[in-house]
Image: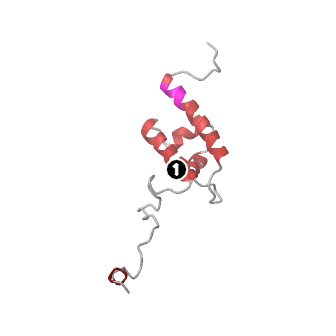
Amino acid sequence: MTKAADQRPATLPSTDPPALAGGRPTLMEVTHASQREAAAAAWWRRNIMHLTQEQLAPLIGYSVETVSYMEFGVTRRGKPYPAKAWRRYRLACSGIDHEIRHSKRFNWGQV
């Protein structure tokens, strides 16, 4: 055996991301697209819109429980949300974003 082979550690370090106190990975550690969307949705609600889940839910027509699940990135059954669900959620949130930022409701191009 070579000298380099003798100096290798007995066990290699784990490649799993470290768990945070709350058990959720950071945005850099997420691995599934649904988790990335969830982290971005929660960040947008808190940092851009300054809304709670309870305030956002009636504005977009979702329940508070569903907003919570969307921001966690998994369905009630523990499966990642499909892309179609994220498109619907993103569309609902973008409508409220427009309404709040521009102080007028979207009206399909009518004056």
Residue density around tag 1, few if under 14, some if 14–19, many if 20 or more, within 10 Å: some
Closer to us: 91 or 32: 32
Rendered residue at 61%/48% (across/down): 66
Give the image location of residue 42, x and y in percent: 49, 45
Whether residue 62 is visible here, answered yes or no, is no
Give the image location of residue 4, x and y in percent: 34, 79
Rendered residue at 39%/82% (across/down): 10
The quarter of the rendered structure image containing the C terminus is top right
Closer to us: 29 or 66: 29
Answer with the quarter of the image where residue 110 lies. top right
Q: Amino acid at mark 1?
A: Arg
Q: Find numbered disc 1 in the image and state the secondary structure of the residue it sits on.
A: helix
Q: Is 28 located above or below residue 5 in the figure?
A: above
Rendered residue at 63%/58% (across/down): 79
Identify the residue position indicated by label 1 in the image: 36
Q: Is residue 13 magenta?
A: no
Q: Is residue 57 left or right of residue 43?
A: right
Q: Is residue 45 left or right of residue 75?
A: left
- What colour-coding does the image apply? secondary structure
Give the image location of residue 85, x and y in percent: 65, 45
Give the image location of residue 93, x and y in percent: 56, 36
Magenta stretch, residue numbers = 97-101
Q: Is 21 located above or below residue 70 in the figure?
A: below
